[in-house]
Amino acid sequence: GVRRPGRGVAHGEGKASMTTVAIVLVALLVAGGRWRAAALAAASSLVLARPVLLLVAATAGALALPFLRFRRRRSDAEAAESEVTMLGELIALGLGAGLTFPGALARAVPSIAPPLRPEVEALLRRARRDGAAAALEEATGHAGRLYGLAGRALATGAPLLPAVQAFVAERRDTERRRAQERVRRLPVRMMFPLAFLILPGFLLLTLGPTLAGALDRLEFPLPSVFGRPPM
């Protein structure tokens, strides 16, 4: 029989689309979260339809898994660090209202984002079991400095509210300096897209017609993209 030329192209496009769907599903499975159940159901259907393509996509996902996990851990760490200042401010408000440090810490838990909340909840459980001062002095984590100064203040009887307020002020100053450093690095980071993407297009747009006209007057053959086609 005569081979239809369109069937091979359509078959290749179908394979490419199925491969893309498989890679997306594997990425959703790796990322987890609320999309994992839907991605697992779709991936199960894909196993029955295209097992080879799913195997290829699973291999690609396995290779990308360490990078995705690193990015997730880094994102969680940055989110937790950003919540430490908020935790200090909430504790200072509670101390100013007459609460103890464990009481102020417990009141602050509902307002803390999930990356830092498990750390604070574990600290509260240790404080109820071993005592607030001992638990705070031994505590580590993203807010380890805050726990340490609070534990020393509780153990020595030093005023706690000024120490927490000084910690919050120091954190705010550090965050401000980091933001200024990111702003100063922005022109350097923008240099690559400006030099290799925007500037060549701008030069081509502004100087292209003039250069095409000059070369045309010198009777050089030019492609049709720069002006009229060569005679």
Image (cartoon, rainbow, N blue to C red):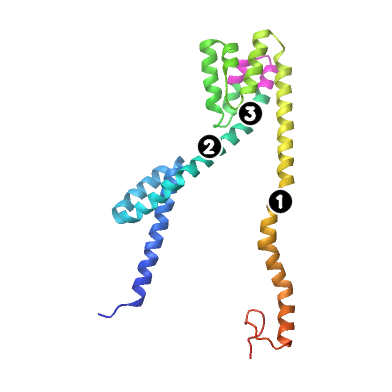
Going from the N terminus, do you reach mark 3 or mark 1 first? 3
Disc number lying in front (1 or 2):
1
Label ID, residue 188:
1
Decide which of 11, 95 is in the foreground and name it: 11
Going from the N terminus, do you reach mark 3 or mark 2 first? 2
Q: Position of residue 216 (x, y in %)?
A: 71, 86
Identify the residue at image location x=73%, y=87%. 218
Residues at circles 3 and 1 in contact by the CB criterion of under 8 Å: no
Characterize the magenta stretch by its predominant secondary structure. helix
Q: Amino acid at mark 2?
A: Arg
Q: Position of residue 15 (x, y in %)?
A: 37, 62
Q: Amino acid at mark 1?
A: Val
Residue 102 in the magenta stretch? The answer is yes
Element type at mark 1 = helix
Label ID, residue 84:
3
Tell me the magenta residue range: 91-106
Element type at mark 3 = helix
Residue 84: name its quadrant.
Answer: top right
